[in-house]
Amino acid sequence: MKPVDTNRKLPSQIKAIPLAKMRVSVNAQRELRPGRVNALLSDFDLDELGLIVANQRDGFFWIIDGQHRVEALKQWLGNWDDQLIECRVYSGLTEKQEAEMFDRLNNQLTVGALDKFKVRVTAGRPSEVAVSKIVQQQGLKIGPSGSAGNIGSVSTLVRVYERSGPSTLSRALRIAHGSFGDPGMTAPVIDGFGHLCERYNGALQDDKTVERLMTLRGGIGALMSRADVLRKQTRKPSAQCVAAAVVDILNSKQGGSKLPSWWST
């Protein structure tokens, strides 16, 4: 369980640290997973704890790698106020540097996309920082899907941003959420509206698009059903089929100018 030290160029020492002095930054770490802690407790072996990686800052030792092991140790000990734990300790890193180190240490481990996104925002990664601001500007939040105003599809957000730029991502979120609310904040829908906004640009009238889709019988379910039929027929990615389905729906309205078919452009 000994972690790989990916930061050998930074000076560090092996020290015995009081558990009572250890802290976890909510910005530079993943959220604590009780299930993971319970899994460690089910077969806990103190000899296999491994080195915890921490940074000495502001009078405390901020955990960079090993918060679940530390929490499991606390619960295993019960009374841990005076307990010492062996750690690899860096000194004077900023919270941003802690986040960067966590990202590197866990790059090859199973870390949730939301956790990695949050840490990368703290670390100042340009794409993640920009996406976070765009989401906030639309009155939405990065977080687990299912809660009001949350978007959990962070990989899709970053992909649309890097592929098409900030204005396209902002516009795609505005149209998709305006049309379908929170149920429209899924990966294929966000990606599909990103494709739609990028390809049709000024020919796509945002307000009229929202007005038409808001009155779509069956709402987001109807859109996804149409997209699924197109996916089976064309074997194209779901996002492209969402875009194509939206074009078909907009063009089905009587009168007005029509958009070129998705498949003809």
Image (cartoon, grey):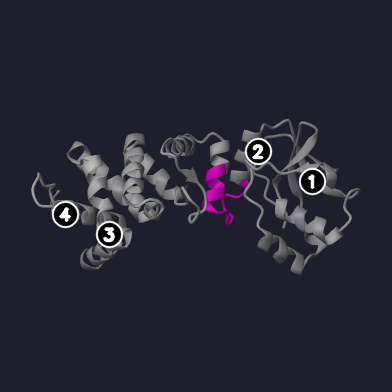
Rounded to the nearest angstrom, the CA distance separating label 3 from label 4 is 17 Å
Q: Position of residue 174 (x, y in %)?
A: 34, 42
Vertical arrangement, residue 102 with respect to residue 226, above or below = above
Disc 3 secondary structure class = helix
Residue at coordinates 76% horizontally, 54% vertically from top-left? 71
**Disc 3 marks which residue?**
223
What is the span of residues highlighted in magenta in the rendered image?
105-118
**Disc 2 marks which residue?**
98
Magenta stretch encompasses residue 106: yes
Rounded to the nearest angstrom, the CA distance separating label 2 from label 3 is 43 Å
Label 4 is placed on what type of residue?
Answer: Trp
Task: Locate residue 72 relative to residue 130 in the image: left or right.
Answer: right
Please give the label number shown on residue 87.
1
Q: Position of residue 96 (x, y in %)?
A: 62, 34
Residue at coordinates 34% horizontally, 50% vertically from top-left? 191
Rounded to the nearest angstrom, the CA distance separating label 1 from label 2 is 15 Å
Q: Position of residue 98 (x, y in %)?
A: 65, 38
Residue at coordinates 82% horizontally, 41% vertically from top-left? 21
Verify CB contact (< 8 Å) between mark 1 and mark 2. no
Label 1 is placed on what type of residue?
Answer: Cys
Alpha-carbon neighbours of circle 4 within 10 Å: few (<14), some, or many (≥20)?
A: few
* For discs 2 and 4, the disc positioned in front in the rendered view: 4
Alpha-carbon neighbours of circle 1 within 10 Å: few (<14), some, or many (≥20)?
A: many
> Closer to the N terminus: mark 1 or mark 4?
1
> Closer to the N terminus: mark 2 or mark 4?
2
Label 2 is placed on what type of residue?
Answer: Glu
Rounded to the nearest angstrom, the CA distance separating label 1 from label 4 is 58 Å
> Closer to the N terminus: mark 3 or mark 4?
3
